[in-house]
Image: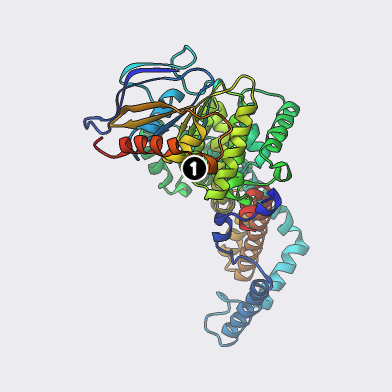
Amino acid sequence: MSAVDEVGASDETSRTPRRHGGGPGVWLWRLAVPPIVLGVWQLAHHMRLSSSALLPSPGAVWDATVSLHRSGALWSNLSSTLAAAVGALTLSALVGTPLGVLLGMLPRAWAVLGPYLNALNSTPRIALAPVFVVLLGIGQSSKVALGFSIAVFIFLMNARAGVLSADEEHRRVCLTLGASKAQLFWKLYVPVALPAVFAALRLGAVYALLGVVSSEILASQSGVGQLIASYSATLSMAHVYSLLIILAIFASVLTLVLGAVEASLLGWQQAGRR
Amino acid sequence: MALRSVTVGFGANGRAPVRVLTGLSLVVERGQLVALVGASGCGKTTVLDLVAGLVGPSSGEAAVLGEPPRVGRRDVGYMFARDALLPWRTARQNVELGLEVQGWGRRARRDLAERLLGRVDLSSVLDRYPSELSQGMRQRVALARTLATDPAVLLMDEPFAALDAQTRASVRSVFLDIWGDELDRKTVLFVTHDLAEALLVADRVVVIAGGRVQVDIEVPWSRPRHERSLFRRPDYSALYDTLHAHLRPGT
C-alpha cells in the first residue's frame, strides 16, 4: 500500500461524527429569524399587548437608530465601549491564559489557590464598580478593569481545564525527549489548551462587553452604557432597544470573527473532521 | 545496560506498595536487540520506564551506558505502544519535536525530519496532520521521531501491537532495515507479548514472570530472518514451545 493510498484511511477519521454547524439550509433559517421576530414584535405592538412606552414599534426603534446616527452620539460612544471591551478581553487573555496553564501544570498551587479563585469568581463583580471608579477614575480604565475582572476567570478556568485534558502519553513523549518545564509549557500545554482558550475568547468577548457596559451604566463619561442609562431615566425605550440591538450585533460580529480566527489557527482540528 | 536485583513498587494513598519488579537482573550488551516477553502486568513496561528514568527503583541498581537512568537523556529513545503523536503538529513537525527540544536550527531539523520520513516511506505526507494518517503511517512517524535524536539505546514498548498483521510486518521490516543498516547499531529493548515476533526480531529473548527474569535465551538464527522460512524450521517449534511454557502463569 502506498503512502498516498493510506492517507485518510484511519478508522479514527472515519468514525469522527459530522458537525452540523453550517450549510445553506442553516443559513437560510438563520436569515429567516429576524423577519419573524420583527413580525411578532410588530403584531404585539399593534395588538397593544404592552404600553407603547415600554414596547415601541420596530419602526420607532429604527427612527431612534437613525436619530442616534445623525446626532453623532452613537459612533463616538460605541467606539468608546468597544475599545474598552477589546482592551478588557485582551488583558484577560494575556493574564488569564498563562496563569491557567501554569495552574494546570502545578496541581499543588491549584490545591492551595483554587478555593480562593473559585470564591473570587463567584462574587458579583458589578459590586466592585465603585471601587474601580474611585481607584482608576471615571474614564476608560475603570471600565476595562470591571470587564477584566469578569473575563479573566473564564480564560484562567478554561486554560487550566485544557491543560488537564492533556494526554499522559504526550507528556511522557515530551519528557523522554528531554523537554524542560518551559518547553513542556510552550510545546505541550499551551497548544493543548488552545481550543479551550478560543472557547474562552468567544465567551470572554461577551462577558467583557457586559462588564464594560455595566460599568458605563453605573458611572462613566462616555459609552453605550452611559447612553442607555440616560435614555432609561427618561423612559426613551426606543433608543434603549436600538442601543441594545446594536450592541448585540457587534457582539455577534466579534464572536464570528473570533470563530474564523480559531478555524484558521486550529486547522489540525478541522483536518481530522474532513 | 545493567539492572541488578532491581525492585520497583507502586503504592498510593498510604497503602502498601504493589511490587511489579522483584529483584530483577538483566544485562544487555551494546548493539543487542533484546525482546522482553511476558503476560500482561508482568512488569515488561516497568523495565522500560525504569531504563528511561520515568520510575525509580526502590532497591537494587540500574545503569544505562554507565550512568544511572535519568528522564530525558539524549542517548535514550522511547517508542510507546500508542504513537502519541501531537495532533496539532504535522508529521514533519512531530519528527522535529526532539530536535527542537535539543535546540537544533530550523533548517537542519527540517532536513533530518524529511530524510527520516523518507526512510519510513512517508515523503508524500510530510505536512499532513496525524488525524489524516492511517494507524500504520502514524506508527512510522513515531518511529522516525524516536530515531531523529539518534539515541544509542532504544526502548520500544509493543510498538507494532496496535497494527493489523500486514501493516505490522511492513513497519517491523522498515524498523529492522534501519536498525540493521547502522554501523554502530543501537541497543534495543523491545517489549512484545507476541513470542513469534520476539523470535523474529531479537538477538535474545527474555521471559519475565513474577517480576523477575524467568528465562533468557540467545536466538540462534542469523539475520535476515523471514517469517515463513523461520516457522518451517524444526528447531523453531522447540524453542517457541520452551519459551511458551515459561509464559504460563505460575511457572
- Image quadrant where residue A238 sits: bottom right
- Image quadrant where residue B213 sits: top left
Q: Secondary structure at mark 1?
A: helix
Residue ID at (55%, 39%): A97
| In the rendered image, the vertical position of residue A167 relative to residue B25, given as above or below | below
Q: Is residue B86 visible?
A: no
User: Mark 1: few, some, or many residues within 10 Å (few <14, many ≥20)?
Assistant: few
The image shows a total of numbered marks equal to 1
Which quadrant holds the C terminus of chain B? top left
Residue ID at (78%, 64%): A70
- Of all residues, the one furthest to the bottom in this rendering is A47
Residue ID at (66%, 42%): B90
| In the rendered image, the vertical position of residue A142 relative to residue A270, given as above or below | above
A17 relative to B42 in the view: left or right? right
- Of all residues, the one furthest to the top in this rendering is B66
Residue B59 picture location, percent across and down = 30, 18
Residue B122 picture location, percent across and down = 69, 42
Residue A46 picture location, percent across and down = 60, 86
The disc numbered 1 marks a residue on which chain?
B
Q: Which residue is mark 1?
A: B232
A123 relative to A196 in the view: left or right? left
* Colour setup of the view: rainbow
Q: Considering depth in this image, is B89 or B186 the residue closer to the camera?
A: B186
- Image quadrant where residue A71 sits: bottom right
Q: Amino acid at mark 1?
A: Arg
Residue B82 picture location, percent across and down = 50, 42
Q: Is residue A214 visible?
A: yes
Q: Considering depth in this image, is A120 or B81 the residue closer to the camera?
A: B81
